[in-house]
Image (tube, grey):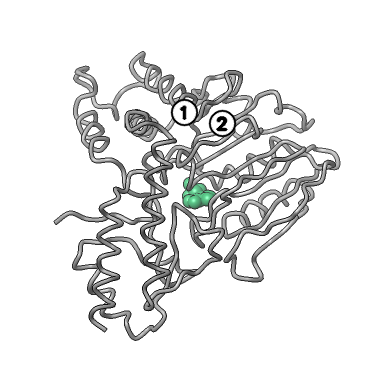
């Protein structure tokens, strides 16, 4: 049976990417070696790294002078790396918006490094919306936000701009829509939502905004180290970089981020219109901030849970249980999830209505 994979991350990848990846695990490009047993300094792998970095630039129309890195440590290390590389050693100050667990963790790491001004937060309302109308002060070293809140299912539909260097954790919606990269000093994203398998974190960096902290940054946490070594300072996560490259190729063949945005919007329209029309279900976030990537919803009446859970499991749907901190259901609809998987879930929601 076809499995409709709604996992929140690591998550669905395109079938042809999985096939190419599995071929390369046995024999990479006819070399007779597995991608897993080759030197990262081999000319074959250096070409993979160069191509992956170039495809990120192509996909998001990244300005020429920006750098693209594939590092380890997840977006979770990115929280600390952001603060270390952009907050001044003396009197360092930063501004954050708190829209969920990931922003909260980013704020916590930044507080180890310097002063954090939380401009706005939706924590008091269980992160069910994106705060609006906050003003980014000009006297801070940088402004940080999380574009899509994977757990709560909210997303900045209009992205902010900033008078100070802007940093964004785009882990769960990078490559889902066109963005204006030149608005950002840095974008970072764990690969395992829209890009590839876990293990790599992509960083898109304006190098002109680096090196202004007066701080002695450990080599591995210093973005300049990795820029100078073209993302090869130490052994990179080779398999994750390779599969990310394959996913970028797939995405560009489909028509790039514009095509992704079009299909993602169709998927989101389909599920949210069912949530709104079907009296058995309700959305968990404010309508205007609904995420195109992660739709969170719940049953109006808990008594229907056993029947609903049985129905979707029998339909081959996997991974729609909500995050433990938010409950309910969460349909993660990353780029690789086809529209017919969303149609299958909506069918089940309609069947439930006809049954009760
Ligand atoms: C998944 C996720 C993270 C955490 O990523 P790790 O790679 O596990 O560190 C951070 N931010 C957002 C928005 C996420 O969705």
- Residue 112 is situated, as x and y percent measured from the top left of the image, at 72, 50
Q: Quadrant of residue 19?
A: top left
Vertical placement of residue 332 versus 239, above or below: below
133 sits to left or right of 177: right
Q: Earlier in the sequence, mark 2 or mark 1?
A: 1
Q: Quadrant of the N terminus?
A: bottom left
Badge 1 element: helix
Badge 2 element: strand
Vertical placement of residue 244 versus 282, above or below: above
Residue shown at 28%/27% (left/top)? 35
Vertical placement of residue 284 versus 334, above or below: below
- Residue 285 is situated, as x and y percent measured from the top left of the image, at 53, 66
135 sits to left or right of 356: right
Q: Quadrant of residue 134?
A: bottom right
123 sits to left or right of 211: left
Q: Which residue is mark 2?
A: 204
Asked if labels 1 and 2 touch by Cβ distance under 8 angstroms, the answer is yes
Q: Quadrant of residue 105?
A: bottom right
Residue at the limit of the structure toward the top, as seen here: 43
Residue at the limit of the structure toward the left, as seen here: 1
Q: Quadrant of the C terminus?
A: bottom left
Question: Is the residue at mark 1 in contact range of ligand 1, meaning its CB lies under 8 Å from it?
Answer: no
Q: Nearer the viewer, residue 177 or 1?
A: 177
Residue shown at 63%/51% (left/top)? 106
Q: Which residue is mark 1?
A: 56
Residue shown at 49%/69% (left/top)? 284
């Amino acid at each position: 049976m076809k499995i409709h994979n709604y996992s929140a991350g690591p998550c669905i990848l395109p079938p042809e990417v999985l096939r190419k990846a599995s071929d390369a695990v046995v024999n990479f490009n006819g070399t007779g070696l597995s991608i897993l047993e080759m030197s990262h300094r081999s000319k074959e792998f250096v070409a993979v790294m160069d191509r992956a970095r170039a495809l990120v630039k192509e996909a998001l129309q990244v300005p020429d002078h920006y750098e693209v890195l594939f590092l380890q440590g997840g977006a979770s290390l990115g929280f600390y790396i952001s603060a270390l590389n952009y907050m001044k050693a003396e009197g360092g100050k930063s501004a954050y918006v708190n829209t969920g667990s990931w922003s909260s963790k980013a704020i916590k790491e930044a507080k180890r490094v310097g002063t954090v001004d939380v401009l706005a937060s939706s924590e008091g309302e269980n992160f069910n919306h994106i705060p609006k109308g906050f003003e980014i002060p000009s006297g801070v070293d940088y402004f940080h936000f999380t574009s899509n809140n994977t757990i709560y299912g909210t997303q900045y539909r209009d992205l902010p701009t900033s008078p100070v260097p802007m940093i964004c954790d785009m882990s769960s919606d990078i490559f889902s829509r066109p963005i204006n990269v030149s608005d950002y000093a840095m974008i970072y994203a764990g690969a395992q939502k829209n890009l590839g398998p876990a293990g790599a974190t992509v960083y898109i960096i304006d190098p002109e905004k680096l090196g202004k902290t007066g701080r002695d940054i450990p080599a591995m946490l210093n973005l300049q180290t990795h820029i100078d070594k073209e993302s090869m300072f130490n052994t990179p996560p080779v398999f994750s970089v390779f599969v990310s490259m394959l996913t970028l190729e797939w995405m560009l063949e489909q028509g790039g981020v514009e095509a992704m945005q079009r299909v993602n919007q169709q998927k989101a329209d389909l599920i949210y219109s069912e949530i709104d029309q079907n009296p058995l279900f309700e959305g968990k976030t404010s309508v205007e901030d609904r995420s195109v990537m992660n739709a969170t919803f719940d049953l109006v009446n808990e008594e229907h849970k056993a029947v609903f859970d049985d129905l979707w499991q029998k339909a081959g749907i996997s991974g729609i249980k909500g995050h433990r901190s938010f409950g309910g259901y969460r349909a993660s609809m990353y780029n690789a999830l086809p529209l017919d998987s969303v149609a299958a879930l909506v069918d089940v929601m309609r069947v439930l209505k006809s049954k009760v």
